[in-house]
Amino acid sequence: MNPAFDYATAFCRNLGLVNPEEQERLRRSRVAIAGLGGVGGIHLLTLARMGVGRFRLADPDHFELANFNRQAGAFMSTLDRPKVEVMRAMALDINPEAEVEVYPQGLAPDNLAAFLDGVDVALDGLDFTAVDVRALFYAEARRRGVPVVAVGPVGASAASLVFMPGGMSWHDYFAMDLARNDFERYVLFIVGTAPAALHMPYIDRRYVDLANRRGPSLALAVQLCAGIAAAEVLKLLLGRGRVRPAPWYQQYDAYRGRLAVGRLPWGNRGPLQRLKFHFAKRLLARRATAA
């Protein structure tokens, strides 16, 4: 422990936006972050700077050059190092008193219960193609009464969903049972994450490659996601402020300066979402054929 560190001093500038009792609540709160890639790492650092004192982190990957454009822990000095180790060290460099547990093997059916045990709020930072483990993650969180915040970068925007234990489930919202293969699962995830599609007028679809699990991304969108996710986590941990749980969705696009807030009472099963799914599937399938 660094004797120069003092929690009250380190986070005193939070006061006025949270009160001393709420800051102490943040200090005692435990947040689980599944995935430390584009958004997961910056989620962690943002919450650590807000004074959240306990974390569980899960990610099996190592940093590589392709991460440099957006991931908070990606540096020349961290190439080929495990993401959980790098991000744990960064969080402890902000708050040496923090409790940071790591799951370097990532999430699997045999460790989800331990990962979510005693957690106040969970964050979904999993890769968009991790459909199977994501379904298990949300089911276990719901079973344990843990809210899950999911804010993903799409284009130059942040798309936000919050799943509450008593509200619409991830399974019912995304309706993955409608898909016949992985490609259709990815499309369902895309149209459900950002139903307003504010990013579509400017995104170059030549760089969207679902077959190889790649798509364009910008650091600015990841930063937007961290702020929005942290706001939702703050409201949930402190029990104040309005949270719009799924089937509500939000998307803020900084490039276009537009905000979309809406509600999908039937999730991806709704008629308009089914039309969007078929349109997006044809569009992305043509891209895959042309490539």
Image (cartoon, grey):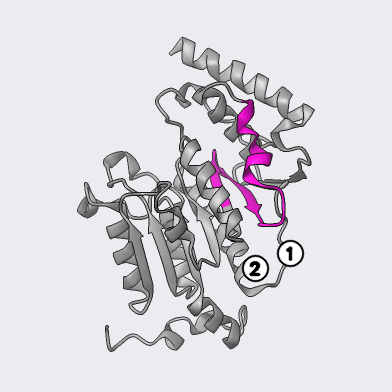
237 lies above or below 169: below
Residue 287, position as x, y percentages in the image: 51, 16
The residue at the point 60 percent across, 71 percent down is: 237
The residue at the point 28 percent across, 59 percent down is: 85
Most distant residue in the front direction: 110
Mark nearer the N terminus (1 vs 2): 2
* Discs 1, 2 touching: Cβ within 8 Å: yes
Which residue type carries mark 1?
Arg
Which residue type carries mark 2?
Lys
112 lies above or below 193: below
Residue 14, located in which quarter of the rendered image?
bottom right
Which of 254/47 is in front? 47
User: Callout 2 environment at 10 Å: few (<14), some (14 to 19), or many (20+)?
Assistant: few
User: In which quadrant is the N terminus drawn?
Assistant: bottom left
Please name the residue that numbered disc 1 is placed on: 242
The residue at the point 57 percent across, 60 percent down is: 144
Query: Which secondary structure lies at badge 1?
Result: loop
Q: Distance between the residues labelled 1 and 2?
A: 7 Å
The segment highlighted magenta reads 150-178
Please name the residue that numbered disc 2 is placed on: 235
